[in-house]
Amino acid sequence: MTVTRPSERGGAVWVPVGPRDAAPPERERRRPAYGPWRALWRRYRRDQGAVVGLAVLATIAAIIIAAPLLAAYPPDVPLDIIALKSQPPSWLHPLGTDPVSRDVLSRVLYGGRVSLAIAVLAALTAATVGTLYGAIAGYAGGAVDAIMMRVTDACLSIPRVLLLLTVAALWGRLSIGGLVLVLGFTGWFGVSRIVRGEVLALRDREWAIAARALGAGATRTLLRHILPNVASPIIVAIALGIGNVILLEAGLSFFGVGVQPPQASWGTIMQDGADQVRALWWLTVFPGLAIVTTVMAVHAVADGLRRAADPRSGYGARP
Amino acid sequence: MRSFVVRRLVQAVTVAAAVTTLTFVLIHLAPGDPLAGTMDDPRIAPSVRAHWRQVYGLDRPLPVQYVRFLTGVARGDLGFSVSYNEPVIAVIRRAVPNTLMLAGTALVLSFAAGILIAVIQVRREGTLTDRALGAISLGLYSLPDFWLAQVALLAFSYWLPIFPAGGTIDPVIHPYLGPAAAALDRVRHLVLPAVTLAALTAAWIARFQRAALLDVAADDYLRTARAKGLSEWTILVRHALRNALLPVITLFGLSLSAFVSGAVFVEKVFGWPGIGSVAVDAVGARDYPVIIACTIIGSILVAAGSLIADLLYMLADPRLRRAEGDADGGATSAVAGA
Amino acid sequence: MTEPLLSIRDLRVTFATDGGVARAVDGVSLDLAAGEILGLVGESGCGKSVTAMSVLRLLRPPARIEPGSEIWLDGRDLLALPERAMRSIRGRRIAMVFQEPMTALNPVLTIGHQIAEVVRVHERASRGAARARAVAALEQVGVPDPDLRARQYPHQLSGGTRQRVLLAMALVLHPAVLIADEPTTALDVTVQAELLALLADLQRRLGMAVLLITHDLGVVAELASRVAVMYAGQLVEEAPVQELFARARHPYTQGLLEAAPRLAPRDGPHGSGGRHGGGAGRLRVIPGTVPPATAWPSGCRFHDRCSAAWDRCEREAPPSHAVDASHRARCHLAAEPERRAALPVALTGSVR
């Protein structure tokens, strides 16, 4: 219970306020101090759907991380092109085999690593680019902001799939890294709008002005003072971005322009069965279920985060 | 209002210019030049290649090429399609009406279904019905578009052969059908792709509409409506929904590009000859001018769609319309806030 | 008193909250006679709005009207009616005007539509006829140029006009009872005075009963013929307006009177024109605040803020004593004249 007052000599002097050595009230002392993250978690925990989503997501993550332990066969190697071609689910191959006799379960496990790695990295790339772009626009304001936002508005009008098809066609086959970059750089427009709006609203708050008044430069004010306050919408955007990229990657791979064979991803497994969906249904159904489960869990987590961070807001577009 | 329309039209032109510029940049960032795929064949004499590069202006400095490209697009000259062996604009002109037909039908269906689901959910808030519908929406919302299309095709065209498997018409019998039967044939072909696309979008709309309805649920004017003796349905539909529709229209305008992306997948799976199918086929054929044209046209469609959404918003919200005879000194200033 | 038009019997309303069950209204009985204006006053949180909302059954969960409560109108218990029958009462027999004219009107519907809607749901009126009734109602509440106004949207009107629109909406079917919940609180003082005059005028012309809910004793002095004072979910005093202002018996009422500026009932409750200027003397405030509805104090709920309280007040909840035929007070003092006589002048009820 002390406050700091500047003394005439410039140094800080601790001036006790209130009764000397007064112990804090019993209740206050026993309650553990918790910051905004704990508060967020406490609100998040109340949301049943969000907790289930998080648990499902954690399970999926654990399974695909342990893929080498769980997969009985190598994912990319044909086992027996004559005898084990296109086998329906059986004890030995619970999810069947594909037209070149690879074990689908092993491919789904390893493919999950590829699909999720791409999704997480691309969503992080998008969030980083979008945050920087939006923060600069919002902090600069004025004409710079207007021009930068016109550009994002224009980019938001481009159907992402068509843009991705253009890139894929121009570059031919993309490496996984290339795919991450392309998906990341076509996914940041929405994030930049959110961050720009928040920064614009926050940059003139008293504490931001105080930070500047104390000599913090623009970069420092932005990075240390303003952006931490925008953290929760950015996290929600990353979560939604992960869900979207999983769906997009699957779609692109399904069109043959995403992950390239023989590398397995959830999309490429489905593409292997696309010509004969009726006969080889297991190639479509099982990776599809993996995608739906994962994306549903991601959306449940994103919803829970949003509600926990801002109980009054309701939305989040599918970019 | 007119200045608003002008501003939005300018914005639509900006979109077109930005997309064109972006694709130009992409073309030149990509390895090789646009003729690399078709011309860099050792069997073609270097002089012939140089000739064609000159014809396409690829030997000029980049800024000149850029201006040529821009003016070409503005004139509707989108290049020549190698795979179709005709001008790209002809290919696009055939595809756009099909895309509009599919997207328009799906939009109407999805709004109708999405709003209906949301209204039912809110009317039964917290019940099993609400939660079940919520879970179904979340599930649909989490489905890969092409996967749902495939399953729909499998279910209603192979297992239960109710609908045709693809295309816009039956190529064999359509020419011999009378006008009514021909129309029915078109509808039969439209149902599956339109419902598939609508289902994905309806899930999205239902989620937002529900949130928006719950957002206005505590508003005072609903209490006034209750005090007037209106039934809960009337209150929900006439009073709450009218207000809750506004944010959904805005958000929809913002996510039209996602809708078109979904249409690409659905068109491809159902063999619906719209710009999505054309674009995907062009990727396989390495027919760049066609893909680029599809991207540009797709973006312009989205920009036009969001312009329409904005106009609808203005129609739906009287606060944004110009006040007539505002003798009461009311909040005309609110109009300026638009 | 004659047979009451609206009769509230032992109304109890609870809210389930995180902090326990809040007994927002706890055994209120109140009669409203045809053609009278009854003022219901009290600080915020005392349960007066909840009482009003209960009459129209507009409360939503977690609020709950406890079984045993009754509200009688036209020989029927409104609380026992099916929802459908209750709907035909709302807006037709009992209408309500709310506090916030800015938000109580639907922003996307025209004024005319919103008024005509009342006619159309209760009577088989054609669109045109309902519309004409709406315009007539606007005219009745003194909205100039009612034809134009009917075509306008709420945002095009000023706060005072919006409140008139709400009044028109409430009165279009000539209800027997009007409940006005702080109808002028959100408005400028001059607009307030105009609206109060209008309300008094309309009440007289239409002969309806008005339940006027307010925290402003000045408004009560100007309009009401009878006053009921609420504190902590209960009625603490009830009397004709002159009697209450002259001889308030409950220390809470006395506190309210002392805390309010410019108080003196006028010659008659239905006068017009401005209020009397405030008398001399310093304003006093009642110490403390209304306790939370989850934890009303034991005994008399006012005892911890009451300067006249003694140990009995803490122990024993006072019943509602009849001071005379029309005056009741929920205070032990009403039954102990000796103790009352011993109190300082300020607490004996002769305020100024």
Image (spheres, rainbow, N blue to C red):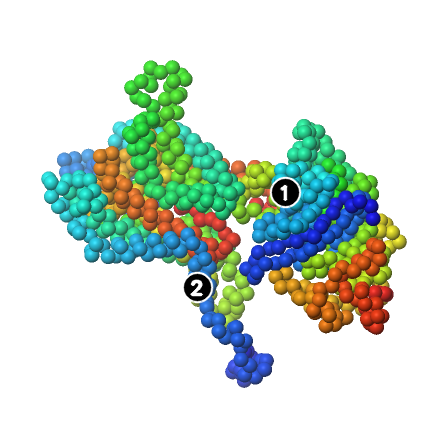
Place of residue B146 in the rendered image (x, y in percent of width and height, measured from the top left)? 32, 38
The residue at which mark 1 appears reads as: B226
Residue A165 horizontal side relative to residue C11, left or right:
left
Residue type indicated by callout 1? Arg
The quadrant holding residue A134 is: bottom left
Q: Are marks 1 and 2 in contact (CB under 8 Å)?
A: no
The C terminus of chain C is located in which quarter?
A: bottom right
Residue lying furthest right in this view? C267
Q: Nearer the viewer, mark 1 or mark 2?
A: 1
Residue A8 horizontal side relative to residue B78, left or right:
right
Label 1 in the same subunit as label 2: no
Q: Element type at marker 1?
A: helix
Q: Element type at marker 2?
A: helix
Q: Is residue A162 above or below residue A241?
A: above
Pointer 1 local density, CA inside 10 Å: few below 14, some 14–19, many at least 20: many
Residue in the picture at 73% in, 70% down: C312
